[in-house]
Each structure stands twice: as C-alpha cells, then as structure tokens.
Image (cartoon, helix red, strand yellow):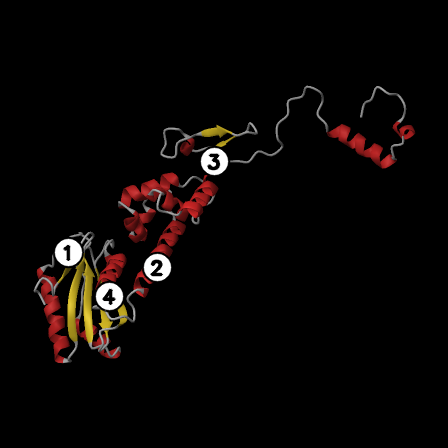
Amino acid sequence: MATNDSTPMSARGFSEDAMRGLEDLDARLPPPGASTKPAFTRSFRKTDRLSKDMAAGGGLITGKDGEKRPHYWGHRERLRTRFLSGGHQPMPDYEVLELLLFNAIPKIDVKPLAKRLLSAFGDLNGVVAASEHRVLQIEGANRKVYLQLRIVEAFAHRMAQASILHREVVSSWDALISYCRTAMAHRETEQFRVLFLDRKNVLIADEEQARGTVDHVPVYPREVVKRALELSATAIILVHNHPSGDPTPSQSDIEMTDKIAEVCGVLDITVHDHVIIGKADELSFRSAGLL
C-alpha cells in the first residue's frame, strides 16, 4: 500500500504477515476513479410480465441499494406475513390462490396466473374443481399446479365429510347437503354417489358409484343394492350433480330413481331421498313429491 512516509513498514512494528496482508489488499483495490459494480447481481427472467401494462404491473423498481429488480421480489414474503397476521378474510380470491401457487411455481410472479385461473373458472370453487385437461390449457399452469388444486380439494372433502360420517343424517341434513355441494357442485361431469345408512340412519359409507358425461351418468340398480347388502345398510340416499347448474330432474333421473327404489324395496332397503346438486341450489325428490 502506498504511503508518503518512506520509513519501511517493518521498521514501524508491522509483522511480515501483516505486511503481506496489506500488499494483498492493495492489489485487490481498484485504481482510483475506476467505475465499479457488484461482482454478482441476482438474475431474473426479463419477460413481458415486467411490463407495466401487464396484469402484474410494476416493471422494474430500484431498491435502496441502487439495484434494479422485478417489482414482485419480496411479494411472496409480504403476502405470507399478511395472511398469517390478518387471516384470509380481507384478502381477495386471487391472493389466496397466489399463496397456493407459491408451492407449485418457484421464483416468478404468479399473480397473473392466479387471475387467469379465476377468469377461466369463475371463482375458487371452479378453479379447485377444474379438470386436469382444462387446468393445463391455462397459460403458465402445469401438473404441479394441478397437484396443488387436487390436494386442496381432498382437504375440503375430508373436512366436510368428517362433519357427517358416523352421524345421524336427519339431524345433520344441512351438513350433509353442504358436504354434497363441496364434493359435487362444481364438477364438469356428472357423478353419482350413494350414502349408505344403518338402522339408526347413521351414515356408514359414502361412495361414488359412477361417473359420466356432462349430461349423463350410467347407474345400475343391482350394483347399488349389492353394495348396500355388503355394507349391511338398511337405507340409502342417492346424490348426483348436474354440471349445467340446474338441479331440475330429467325424465331419465326420475325413471332411474324409481327402478332403484323398486329393487331396494324387495330387500327392505329404504331409499330416503335422491338429491340433485346444482351450482347454486339443490333439489330433493322427497320434498318435490317425486319419491
């Protein structure tokens, strides 16, 4: 290191190791007036998402250190902190969906994807219930996104099912309907389920019997009765959904219900009801005088 004092450093009490360290430091320092910048700058993907006219907005911002970086850096931690401190109630749907997408897509801004999913499927219910084929058609979505949606759906179904399983269904009817709506209201194809009850009308099993198309599901009365006998069930409740959203029964729905009731009656198995689940409402055959 340069000095105006011509006295050797060793004569001023510096050890040889210290002198070598100072020489090494002097070699590493840039020349006076040289322009410098960090040896490592955190990289980011410069895509259209950084444009201020995109859904995410914001572009690049300059931090306190003078470095430019994408506007969404730090957004994930801020969102997690807000969620943990204030809960989900004050958060819009797209932010709740963002929290879920963090687990599927690292590093990049997922707000545009969350908004695209909600735009395509209407609301969080529609997003969670969407088929793999339709989810993967959304720009930015992948199988990891679809996996996270299926996990959320599984938790929702298990939690709703826990409120009715092994309980008397008459006193838990509202919970039963709520469970059926959670499991079926937003499906894109028809699904037929049978709830099996014991002599005290306690739910002992809830099973999917068949899946179909957007307006038809094949149901075989003998298979329904056979399964009831295997479970020692003495009563059943039939449930299926109408993807159109309208719970009004078709003529084939009525005829199928009559056939199942007829076969069950021969074996003293009671058909308590047949409930059709729509997107915003449901219809009970017994309440409508159809059973």
Residue 289 position (above or below residue 246): below
Horizontal and vertical percent position of residue 157: 31, 60
Q: Residue at x 61, y 27 (%)?
A: 37
| 171 vs 180, nearest the viewer | 171
In which quadrant of the rendered image does the C terminus lie?
A: bottom left
Mark 4 or mark 1: which comes first in sequence?
Answer: 4
Give the CA separation, mark 1 to mark 2: 24 Å
Residue tagged by mark 2?
A: 154
Of the residues under marks 4 and 2, which one precedes in the sequence?
2
| Viewer-proximal residue among 27 and 289 | 289
- Residue 45 is marked as 3
The earlier-in-sequence mark between 3 and 4 is 3
Q: CA distance from mark 3 to mark 1?
A: 48 Å
Q: Quadrant of residue 1?
A: top right
Kind of residue at disc 4 = Ser
Q: Quick one: SS at disc 3?
A: loop
Q: Nearer the viewer, mark 4 or mark 2?
A: 4
Mark nearer the N terminus (2 vs 3): 3
Q: Is residue 207 left or right of residue 251?
A: right
Residue 247, disc: 1
Within 10 Å of disc 2 (Cα), the crowding (few <14, some 14-19, many 20+) is some
